[in-house]
Image (cartoon, grey):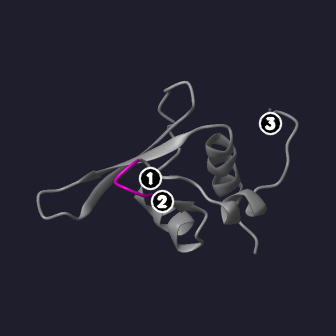
Amino acid sequence: MNISRDEQRILHLMAQGGRIEIIRSETKTIEEARCFTRDGWLYPGFGLEMFRKLKQKKAISSSGGKPYRITQRGLILVRPQLNNR
């Protein structure tokens, strides 16, 4: 399955220890999604649409109310790059 360049960037951040946190409204619908690097910096090119695409492709998941992390499927989808540690 092909994924876009922006999705690749997000998956690389998450493979290196990043996380996605969501903000819910009072009616329990998702209002906003934020992507953080492993250093705690907010990634600017991430939004609700990107979150839904990655979740639909089963590249990210959450368990126990914790932030979203990359899954095994997401690790398969991400292409290797030189800056990975």
Residue 85 vertical position relative to residue 61 in the rendered view, above or below: above
Q: Where, quadrant-wise, is the N terminus in this rendering?
A: bottom right
> Do the residues bearing badges 2 and 1 touch, measured as CB atoms within 8 Å?
yes
Identify the mark nearer the N-term, 2 or 3: 2
**Where residue 37 sits in the image (x, y, percent)?**
56, 33
SS at circle 1: loop
Identify the mark nearer the N-term, 1 or 3: 1
Which of labels 1 and 3 is toward the front? Answer: 3
Q: Where, quadrant-wise, is the C terminus in this rendering?
A: top right
Q: Residues within 10 Å of mark 1 (few under 14, many from 20)?
A: few
**1 left or right of 28?**
right
**50 left or right of 57?**
left
Asked whether residue 70 is drawn in magenta, I would say no
Mark 1 sits on what residue?
47
Mark 2 vs mark 3, CA separation in Å: 22 Å
Q: Which residues are magenta?
A: 62-66
Mark 3 sits on what residue?
84
Which of labels 2 and 1 is toward the front? Answer: 2
Asked whether residue 65 is drawn in magenta, I would say yes
Query: Residue 34 lies in what quarter of the image?
Result: top left
> Do the residues bearing badges 2 and 3 touch, measured as CB atoms within 8 Å?
no
Determine which of the numbered discs, if any, sits on residue 37 in the image: none
Q: Residue at x 71, y 55 (%)?
A: 5
**31 left or right of 15?**
left
Q: Residues within 10 Å of mark 3 (few under 14, many from 20)?
A: few
Q: Residues within 10 Å of mark 2 (few under 14, many from 20)?
A: many
Mark 1 vs mark 3, CA separation in Å: 23 Å
Q: Amino acid at mark 3?
A: Asn
Residue sitting at the far left: 26
Mark 2 sits on what residue?
51
Q: Residue at x 82, y 54 (%)?
A: 79
Q: Amino acid at mark 2?
A: Phe
